[in-house]
Image: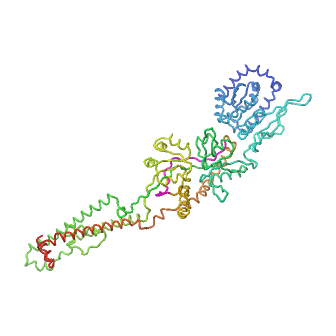
Amino acid sequence: MLKAVFLSVLFARFFTNSRAAADLSPILRNLNERKDLELILVDLLNGLSRQEDITCVAIICDVVYLNVFEGSLFRRTAAVPYVMIVVEEYEDLLSPNFDTLESLRETRKDGCNIYVILLANGIQTSRLLRFGDRYRILDTRAKYIMLHDYRLFHSDLHYLWKRIINVIFLRYHSKINGVLKSKAWFDLSTVPFPNPIKNVFVSRRVDIWNNGRFHYNRTLFADKTSNLNNETLYVVYLDHVPSVVVTKTNDTNKVGGVEIEILNTLAKQMNFQPKLYEPQNADLHKWGEIQPNGTFSGLLGEMVSGKADLALGNLQYSPYHLELTDLSIPYTSQCFTFITPEALSDNSWKTLILPFKLNMWIAVLVVLLISGSIFYGLARHYMNLQEYIKTHESRNTNEKQLDTAEKPVGLYLFGEIINSILYTYAMLLVVSLPKLPTGWSIRLLTGWYWLYCVLLVVSYRASMTAILANPAPRVTIDTLKELVESKIACGGWGMETKKFFQESSDDIQTIGQRFETINDPFVAANKVAKGVYAYYDNENFLKYIRVKRKNIDMNIQSDMVNATSNTTDVFVGEMERNLHIMSDCVVNTPISIGFHKNSPLKPLADIYLRRIVEVGLVEKWLNDAMHPIKSLETNEDEVKALMNLKKLYGAFIALAIGYSISTIGLIGELIHWHLIVKRDPKFDKYAIHLYYMNKNKKQ
């Protein structure tokens, strides 16, 4: 308000200096005398203030129309803030001077929703509108009051009247000389939205103002977007799952997806007919980029040129897109990440040792050695005790008792250190002892050691069952840090994506240094399968790539004899890896529907879109779009959970190791037999038992 008061005072001084010049203007001498323009503005502004809330009124005029705002207009209108901008009649408003530009920016910043433009030069007005639309200096969705001028309706300016639709053109008709009751009057007209403008602009009459009143009392600024009267709107789309899903049937394309469902709902509520079409060379240009001549290709090119009213194609809510188009409120948020190569770690040969980790195996080995040594020590102690009793006790008193005493049964199991370790190991493998050893100390130790063995074996078997039942572990890339450390190339579509990574920090910037742009996602998938590439896109589209590529591979493998070399070059390669989608999101990006720049359809479409999101229709449509993809996905975990020969490699390796050691032992025994035993002078092949008996006595 203070700003408006300051401007009023400032321009009041300017009015005093320029009043004489304005009154001498021969162009509007009669109009200035009757103040008809001032009166109709008073009626228009008062009517608007009664109908809706006026934030502020921006008045843009030149010296010719300056005397319309001498003061009585402000006294007779509602108490609303006014911002006045007076431009020189020679100023080029397609490139306004600094003061005018700053004033226009402040007007937009203050949120003025009424623009009164009174410029005698229609070309100057048209250049102002073009500048305000191009750089969003003017709020094209505000309400405009301006003078009727045929120069505003040139074919080069028709695109403006698809954006500025809340406008009233004031066309002055002077009093007819010679007619007594004839009075000056105004014809109020507007743009024929939603009817398309053909070769010639024909305005539509709204009302007539005469003698201080409106003839029809119609609503001057009626809502023109709530009912588009079944008009045809051109909608450009890009095949990108799940937003737009194109299913080719013979020579026709069936278009579906989340955004198509949203479009159909908006078309029903706003009463228009969507006409879908794809941009030229959509497979190559996709969303489109700026060309050397300054134009845009692809989907964005259709929007920038004004050929399309709406755009569907998974448009990210980003500053780059907002600069070129208008975006609706985001209807969802998508996880953008990388699809990376996956490697299976073939550790089936380690199946027998996988149930326990290294420290557990060390503990088991240490316990085995300690337990075997304890068994050996107790057995030797009990055997020595028996020898002591036999040697030192009286034979007369104890001979009969010794005959009836407990004999050292089973002590040979642990009487030697090697046998003790082997039988202790046998108990660990749940192999029962051939005989229960004599001695309560050894028996008690055996019982507790059996409990230990049962617990250990049960744990081992449970872990082994889980390993054999679960799929083989995979080596995957799930974080940005792992992706950076992998050193593989990264890529995605468009230079804007590359700039996003290059201008970011930390790990993302490192990825940007080796980021490559690529147009064909399936060529990228082929490089990913070779283990040398990672492709960037939204998670749902990456799932679609993975499923489609896998299904094509299966079809090619089944028809390998008839497959062409070109097809196999795209999808099939040697030593291909599975495709894995990173679990970590690089960024969660909002997704919107695109409208052409400064589109009048966006405010009402946002209201309907917000309702669609709130009732859960977007989530339902997303599930419907992704259902075919999810149904085609093979649950590889269930398949690999089945038992197969490969998972028993560890058992065969254990057998091979056992056979090898046994063979080496057998060869060693044969060498010892032929080179040492048979060459001994005391060896007699006909009395071998005597040879070993004498040898044991010496030992």
Q: Position of residue 244 (x, y in %)?
A: 62, 53
Q: Quadrant of the C terminus?
A: bottom left
Figure check: 462 above or below 26 = below
Q: Residue at x 65, y 26 (%)?
A: 97
Residue 467 screen position, x and y as percent: 40, 63
- Residue 148 visible in the snapshot: no
In this view, 689 is above or below 191? below
- The residue under the point 49% across, 43% down is 512
Residue 26 vertical placement versus 650 (above, below): above
Residue 591 is a magenta residue: yes
User: Which portion, as a residue range, is magenta?
Assistant: 573-596
Q: Is residue 642 magenta?
A: no
**Location of the N terminus (image quadrant):** top right
Question: Residue at left 29%, top 59%?
Answer: 362
Q: Quadrant of residue 160?
A: top right
- Return the residue nearer the eye: 225 or 306: 306
Give x and y (percent) for residue 120: 76, 28
Taking 436 as reference, is 508 left or right?
right
Classify residue 256 by image quadrant: bottom right
Q: Position of residue 388 (x, y in %)?
A: 11, 71
Look at the image and tell me whether residue 54 can be seen: yes
Nearer to us in this view, 500 or 331: 500
Colour convention of the picture: rainbow
Front position in the image: 278 or 678:
678
Residue 632 lies left or right of residue 596; in this view the side is left
Q: How many marks?
A: 0
Instruction: From this view, report whether residue 189 is shown above or below residue 556.
Output: above
